[in-house]
Image (spheres, rainbow, N blue to C red):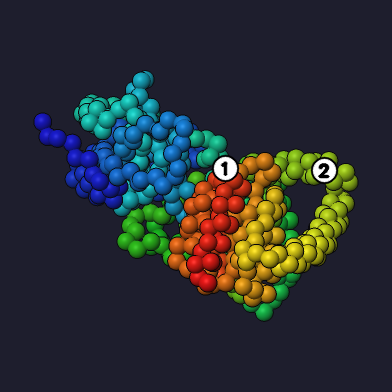
């Protein structure tokens, strides 16, 4: 019996499976004619396996601190599988791939983590469960191949439905934007996981963004009217060498080496476009399209964010919930939110300015007290003062260019741990080992150069007196 090859990388495993599929007698449906591309509402299908291979990449060492929770079980690796047909859409045309599961038998269901178009074939990457090994899974699949037993594939319908709505909305928006009254061409688009997707349009650099926001308000009205008309959206296939292709089809450059009929998606009476993605059968499934944001990412590129269908409904629900919470917090109705928040920000800025002025007065008083002391080493416990006050005090102290050395500490009241800041003449603080020794006495460590050294310690209060004695001794040795 030949031992199973487990590749050290996904790339190597992909090479093997493509070679296997190319050489075997079983047929694998090419991308563009998959079950999911013939019927985008198909949620599951059964299909025999054509080939399978395995890889397990080295696990990266974690740099995170040790956790009290038990570590995850070690990975068994991943399987790469090619079927005769696929309900899973492979990533392409700006649309991410489907996710879901394959049920190998009643006791074994594995997660599909990635689907991609490799050399025109739909290739699934699946996570092998910790309870299985690549060898045991390979044995099961090899038996099923011999028996030509179909395996059930099932997609995550919520994800598929969302991708269909957003992708179909993009087709409709781009088609309307390029009509004669607008003449705005699409450069690219992005189907994102968040609340909105975006389309990048080519625009006139000499026209202000306000011109385009007004234009797209009009486009938004038109696309929503098309949705209310419930126009059909259907896939078809055509030979790109057909004379009708150039006249009928809106398309960007086709991939090099592409042969055979090309998949088209048609919005009745509006647009015919080359596309491999999954789409709704009628525009009513989009429900509504809304533009959210307009941003010039380049002088000739306008990025328009949008959402459609259930994603838009979810976004509106989140917005309503957020508005209700803000209304409760501000105790004003939603029409007063902007004015109320603006007022709060201005009050905050004014308060911060007053605090800075008061802090500077406190710093000046503290500096005067320290300079009046007879000792060349002074210390101060700033209590729970924030670090910005400590830095302000240190900066003011150094600006006097005094021969004195100052050790400051701060931390929560009643606690021994906290931060420390040592400042003074470079001839003292800058001496190699002095700052590190102070940090050691204070139960911690730090860093710095020249006339500054700062850090954190576990015993900044209980060690403060000893640190001052050490600094005084160091000064006396220099005299």
Q: Is residue 339 left or right of residue 94?
A: right
Quadrant containing the N terminus is top left
Q: Is residue 283 above or below residue 131?
A: below
Q: Is residue 363 above or below residue 27?
A: below
Would residue 44 be visible to someone looking at this image?
Answer: no
Residue drawn 86% across the image and 53% down it: 340
Find residue 162 and name its label. Answer: 1
Find residue 329 and name its label. Answer: 2
Residue 196: image location, x then y, percent: 62, 51
Would residue 163 be visible to someone looking at this image?
Answer: yes
Find residue 430 and name its label. Answer: none
> Rounded to the nearest whole Å, what is the CA distance between mark 1 and mark 2?
33 Å
Residue drawn 33% across the image and 35% down it: 75
Count of marks, rendered view: 2
Q: Element under label 2?
A: helix
Disc 1 versus disc 2: nearer the observer: 2
């Amino acid at each position: 019996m030949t031992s199973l090859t487990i590749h050290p990388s996904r790339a190597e495993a992909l090479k093997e499976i493509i070679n296997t599929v190319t050489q075997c007698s079983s047929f694998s449906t090419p991308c563009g004619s998959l079950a999911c591309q013939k019927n985008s509402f198909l949620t599951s299908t059964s299909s025999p396996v054509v080939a399978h291979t395995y890889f397990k990449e080295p696990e990266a060492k974690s740099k995170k601190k040790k956790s009290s929770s038990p570590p995850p079980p070690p990975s068994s690796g991943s399987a790469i599988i090619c079927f005769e047909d696929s309900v899973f859409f492979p990533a392409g045309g700006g649309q991410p791939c489907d996710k879901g599961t394959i049920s190998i038998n009643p006791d074994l269901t594995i997660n599909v983590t990635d689907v991609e178009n490799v050399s025109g074939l739909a290739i699934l990457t699946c996570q092998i469960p910790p309870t299985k090994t690549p060898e045991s899974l390979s044995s099961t699949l090899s038996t099923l191949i011999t028996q030509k037993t179909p395996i059930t594939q099932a997609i995550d319908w919520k994800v598929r439905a969302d991708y269909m709505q957003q992708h179909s909305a993009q087709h409709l928006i781009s088609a309307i934007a390029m009509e004669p009254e607008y003449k705005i061409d699409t450069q690219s688009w992005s189907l994102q996981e968040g609340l909105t997707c975006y389309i990048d349009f080519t625009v006139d650099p000499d026209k202000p963004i306000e011109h385009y926001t007004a234009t797209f308000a009009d486009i938004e009205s038109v696309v929503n009217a098309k949705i209310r008309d419930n126009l059909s959206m259907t896939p078809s296939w055509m030979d790109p060498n057909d004379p009708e292709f150039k006249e009928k089809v809106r398309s960007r450059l086709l991939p090099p080496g592409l042969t055979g009929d090309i998949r088209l998606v048609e919005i009745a009476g509006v647009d015919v476009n080359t596309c491999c993605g999954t789409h709704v059968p009628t525009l009513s499934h989009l429900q509504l399209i809304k533009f959210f944001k307009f941003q010039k990412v380049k002088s000739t590129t306008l990025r328009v964010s949008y959402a459609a269908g259930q994603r838009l409904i979810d976004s509106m629900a989140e917005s309503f919930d957020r508005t209700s919470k803000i209304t409760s917090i501000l105790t004003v109705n939603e029409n007063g939110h902007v004015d109320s928040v603006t007022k709060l920000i201005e009050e905050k800025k004014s308060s911060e300015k007053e605090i800075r002025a008061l802090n500077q007065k406190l710093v000046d008083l503290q500096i005067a007290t320290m300079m009046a002391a007879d000792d060349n080493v002074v210390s101060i416990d700033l209590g729970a003062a924030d670090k910005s006050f400590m830095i302000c005090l240190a900066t003011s102290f150094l600006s006097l260019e005094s021969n004195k050395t100052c050790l400051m500490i701060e931390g929560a009241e009643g606690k021994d741990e906290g931060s420390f800041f040592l400042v003074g003449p470079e001839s003292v603080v800058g001496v190699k080992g002095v700052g590190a020794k102070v940090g050691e006495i204070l139960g911690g460590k730090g860093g710095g150069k020249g006339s500054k050294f700062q850090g954190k310690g576990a015993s900044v209060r209980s060690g403060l007196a000893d640190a001052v004695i050490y600094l005084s001794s160091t000064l006396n040795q220099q005299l």
